[in-house]
Image: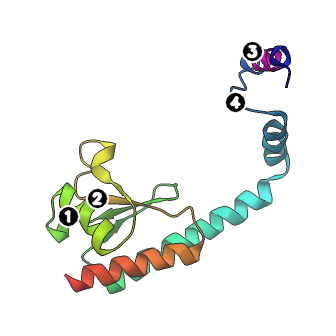
Amino acid sequence: SDPSLREKMQHTFAHLNFGGANPFSTTAFAAAYQHGGAWLDALMAYLAETRDEITATLARAAPVIRVVPAQGTYLLWLDCRALGLDDEALKRFFVREARVGMSPGALFGQGGEGYMRLNLGAPRSVIREATQRIVTAVNAR
């Protein structure tokens, strides 16, 4: 590992605005843009199906939590205000009772209080398990 070669490569990457990129990641990046359309379409359909399933499950099994209609992302906002918990208690409830790690809406600014953000970017089996834990915890209250 020649330090002068490493320095030259770092300078070249910085000059090309690649930052921490390497030849493998730039090749993968180009391939994704050139040939990834079918994969992206399948991913979007998968995420939409997961979103619809989780929304229906919560509406049926834990209607106290209202799902905010997604606006084109893989992040589902859960309106938990009807649980009557402040943000700290809400976070503790999801971590300790439901055993599901989510981001509290309050982290994202004013208006996020009483909401939790569920990331759907995982295998559906994982999201189903998380949803079942939420349902069980809510119904045990």
Residue 60 left/right relative to 128: left
Q: Which residue is mark 4?
A: 20
Q: Say whether residue 68 is magenta.
A: no
For badge 2, the amino acid type reads Tyr
Q: Residue at x 79, y 44 (%)?
A: 33
Q: Which residue is mark 2?
A: 115
Nearest to the eye among marks 1 and 3: give it: 3
Q: Residue at x 78, y 41 (%)?
A: 29
Query: Does residue 18 show up?
Result: yes
Mark 2 and mark 1 lie on one chain; the one further toward the N terminus is 1
Mark 2 and mark 4 lie on one chain; the one further toward the N terminus is 4
Count of numbered circles on the image: 4
Alpha carbons under labels 3 and 2: distance apart: 42 Å
On screen, residue 135 above or below 20 = below
Q: Which residue is mark 3?
A: 15
Q: SS for tag 2?
A: strand
Please state the extent of the stretch shown in magenta in the rendering: 6-12
Alpha carbons under labels 4 and 3: distance apart: 12 Å
Query: Picture coordinates of residue 93 (x, y %)?
Result: 25, 68
Q: Which residue is mark 1?
A: 81
Q: Tell me if label 2 and label 1 are in contact, CB under 8 Å.
A: yes
For badge 4, the amino acid type reads Gly
Q: Please state, as top left, top right, bottom left or bottom right, where the N terminus lies in the image.
A: top right
Crowd band around label 4 with a 10 angstrom C-alpha radius: few (<14), some (14–19), many (20+): few
Nearest to the eye among marks 3 and 2: give it: 3
Query: Does residue 62 show up?
Result: no
Name the disc covering residue 135, or none.
none
Q: Nearer the viewer, residue 68 or 90?
A: 90
